[in-house]
Image: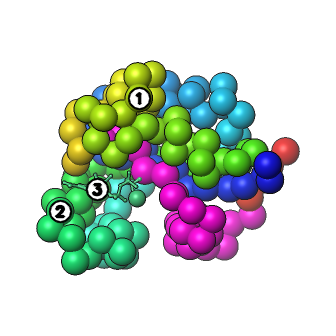
Amino acid sequence: MAIERTLSIIKPDAVAKNVIGKIYSRFETNGLKIVAAQMRQLSQAEAEGFYAVHRERPFFADLVKFMTSGPVMIQVLEGEGAILKNRELMGATDPKKAAPGSIRADFAESIDANAVHGSDAPETAAVEIAYFFPALSIHSR
Ligand code: RTP
Ligand code: MG
């Protein structure tokens, strides 16, 4: 499988719970390298832009409100099949349905406060990485 990059966000609930290190450890022990990172409080416009594909969905306003409710940790992960691997480590969107041992099963409270985001395909990974790291030189070794 090819070396890929994917965008990951540790959402405000998980940052508030003090589990950034535990989540980073899951990435690193599963072959995903953190090649860029920034911790920030998102503005409403940034959160709306990031989740623009969902703007017609009934949960959009709540999603934006949640994503701007506290700081988030944003990172680019790199590794073999990184996009799918990160989605597997994250578990299903609803933590009640997430596989045992997944990040959402272990750290998420609800479908709204679900601990992490991960890009879902190569095209979205490219767009999302450019959204948060527009002019960054990313180091992989
Ligand atoms: P994400 O984009 O955050 O990685 O999550 P995902 O791919 O697993 O789920 P997605 O369908 O892209 O939805 C984005 C976020 O919106 C919230 N959501 N709420 N109430 C609902 O039915 C519902 N559906 C989605 C979740 O917080 C989800 O992470
Ligand atoms: Mg998604």
At x 36% / y 33%, what residue is drawn? 98
In the rendered view, tell whether residue 19 sits above or below residue 3.
above
Report, in whole angstroms, how far the alpha carbon at label 2 lies from the one at label 1. 23 Å
**Residue 39 visible in this rendered orientation of the protein:** no
Looking at the picture, tell me which residue is in the foreground, 83 or 23. Answer: 83
Expressed as whole percent of the image width and height from the top left, the position of residue 108 reads 30, 33
Looking at the picture, tell me which residue is in the foreground, 80 or 97. Answer: 97
**Dot 2, crowdedness within 10 Å: few (<14), some or many (≥20)?**
few
Secondary structure under tag 3 reads helix
In the rendered view, tell whether residue 55 sits above or below residue 122.
below
Is label 2's Cβ within 8 Å of ligand 1? yes
Secondary structure under tag 1 reads loop
Q: Earlier in the sequence, mark 1 or mark 3?
A: 3
Q: Earlier in the sequence, mark 2 or mark 3?
A: 2
**Dot 3, crowdedness within 10 Å: few (<14), some or many (≥20)?**
many
Q: Which residue is mark 2?
A: 59
